[in-house]
Amino acid sequence: MIPPPGTPASDRLRQVTQWGLAIAALQRLRARLTDHEIFPELVREGGQPRLLLGETLTVWTGYSGEVIYWGPDLGAPAANAPAFDLTDVARRIAELVYTAPAP
């Protein structure tokens, strides 16, 4: 049964269905990052899924999962690349991780 619009149940259903493509893109990227021995945590705080790489780098995407963004936090300026080439995205993120100074 589909919940009536404007109810907490319908809001939750909308979040789950809208973020499905984003979660799939982040999971595929996460698998590519393991090739570089990087093991990010997939979290969904506030509804938006993202990958956390320690305390210094966050990776996220929009609803469609077509563009991957990475930076210090969701509100900060971020680098981005199309999600169709996750191998390149993973390489660029790995370069940041391995050249970043220790906190």
Image (cartoon, helix red, strand yellow):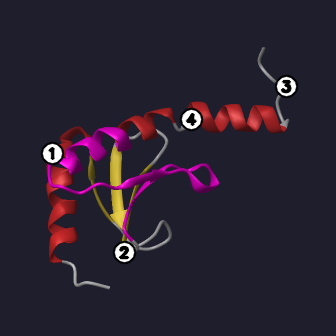
Q: Which residue is mark 4?
A: 18
Quote the CA–CA distance across marks 4 and 1: 25 Å
Highlighted magenta segment, given as a residue range: 26-54
Callout 2: 10 Å neighbours few (<14), some, many (20+)? few
Q: Would residue 80 appear left or right of 47 to someone viewing this image?
A: left
Callout 4: 10 Å neighbours few (<14), some, many (20+)? some
CB atoms of marks 3 and 1 within 8 Å: no
Quick one: SS at disc 1? helix
Q: Earlier in the sequence, mark 3 or mark 4?
A: 3
Quick one: SS at disc 2? loop
Quick one: SS at disc 4? helix
Q: Would residue 6 appear left or right of 59 to someone viewing this image?
A: right
Q: Earlier in the sequence, mark 1 or mark 2?
A: 2
Amino acid under label 2? Thr
Quote the CA–CA distance across marks 1 and 2: 21 Å
Is 77 situated above or below 47?
Answer: below
Quote the CA–CA distance across marks 4 and 2: 27 Å
Quote the CA–CA distance across marks 3 and 1: 41 Å
Amino acid under label 4? Gln
